[in-house]
């Protein structure tokens, strides 16, 4: 039973445009959400997080939106840059424990 | 500040063998979590250790075990290896393992295990 779903295995976006990565979750007990970025041969690196008491969190070019009623979150990258080409993982954790559940990832390709 | 280190980086074993992977967290971090990454399943949580105690556990068989030492270094052991255990094993450390942007997880580069 996959509790965190990233339904798009890959996404291609033109450099300079907006990249939107989507994530759905099924467990209403999740109250903290994170995005990680992973380059080949490296471990994931933390990008941005959002608590369930918020619906938006912004950090530079990265903004995460949370729609609790739809159990959906998205990561917006504006403008997209070549270095943004990587695999992006959506993750969530609940207030019962701090175990982090990851999605399967979306590979983002930024096209020149 | 040194990052999370994992040894070895690559490992080849045969079915039925056992393997031990090592993780050294960032200095001052007391929580260490282990994940298995496979192409089809993404990152799956194995377990988390804090102050030498297993605090959280994922849905993996008992062949997967771990421990944490007093200096917060952690080891993960897989016994009776199966072909399906071939994966990238990632270790992540954080100060306390509790939620909060101040307590993000930092990942190591991983150990690539191949079971033949």
Image: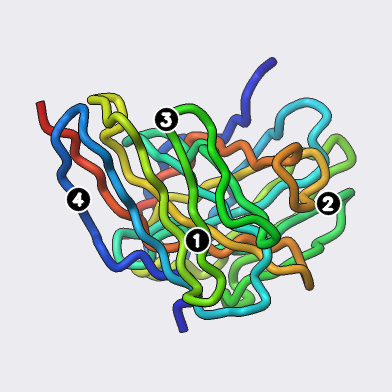
Image quarter where the N terminus of chain B lies is top right
As measured in the structure, the alpha-carbon distance from the residue carrying label 2 to the one carrying label 1 is 20 Å
Separation of marks 1 and 3 at Cα, in angstroms: 22 Å
Q: Is residue A81 left or right of residue A45?
A: left
**Residue bearing the label numbered 2:** B50
Secondary element type, mark 1:
strand
User: Residue A21 at x, y = what percent?
Assistant: 33, 52
Residue lying farthest to the top in this orientation: B1
According to the image, label 4 marks what residue? A11
A73 with respect to A101 (left or right): left
Q: Disc 3 to disc 4, how far (Cα)? A: 18 Å
Asked which secondary structure carries label 3, the reply is loop
Q: Are marks 1 and 4 in contact (CB under 8 Å)?
A: no
Lower sequence index among marks 3 and 4: 4
Pointers 1 and 3 within a single chain: yes
Chain letter of disc 2 in the image:
B
Left or right: residue A54 compared with residue A71:
right
Residue depicted at 72% across the width and 57% down the height: B48
Mark 2, secondary structure of its residue? strand
- Image spot of residue A89 (x, y percent): 42, 52
The residue that disc 3 covers is: A61
Say if residue A47 shows up in the picture: yes
Q: Are marks 1 and 4 on the same chain?
A: yes
Q: Nearer the viewer, mark 2 or mark 1?
A: 1
Q: Residue at x 36, y 69 (%)?
A: B84
């Amino acid at each position: 039973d996959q509790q965190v779903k990233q339904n798009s295995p890959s996404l291609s976006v033109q450099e300079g445009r907006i990249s939107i990565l989507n994530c759905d979750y099924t467990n209403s007990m999740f109250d903290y959400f994170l995005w990680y970025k992973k380059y080949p041969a490296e471990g994931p690196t933390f990008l941005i997080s959002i608590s369930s008491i918020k619906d938006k969190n912004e950090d530079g070019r990265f903004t995460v939106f949370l729609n609790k009623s739809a159990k959906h979150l998205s990561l917006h990258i504006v403008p997209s840059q070549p270095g943004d080409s990587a695999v992006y993982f959506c993750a969530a954790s609940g207030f019962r424990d701090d175990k982090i559940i990851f999605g399967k990832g979306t590979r983002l390709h930024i096209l020149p | 500040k040194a990052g999370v280190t994992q040894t070895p980086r690559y490992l080849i074993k045969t079915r039925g063998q056992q393997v031990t992977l090592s993780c050294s967290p960032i200095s001052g971090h007391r929580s260490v979590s282990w994940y298995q990454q496979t192409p089809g399943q993404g990152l799956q949580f194995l377990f988390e250790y804090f102050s030498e105690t297993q605090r959280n556990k994922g849905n993996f068989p008992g062949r997967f075990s771990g421990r944490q030492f007093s200096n917060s270094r952690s080891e993960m052991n897989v016994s009776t290896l199966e072909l399906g255990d071939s994966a990238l094993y990632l270790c992540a450390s954080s100060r306390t393992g509790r939620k909060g942007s101040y307590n993000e997880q930092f990942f190591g580069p991983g150990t690539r295990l191949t079971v033949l």
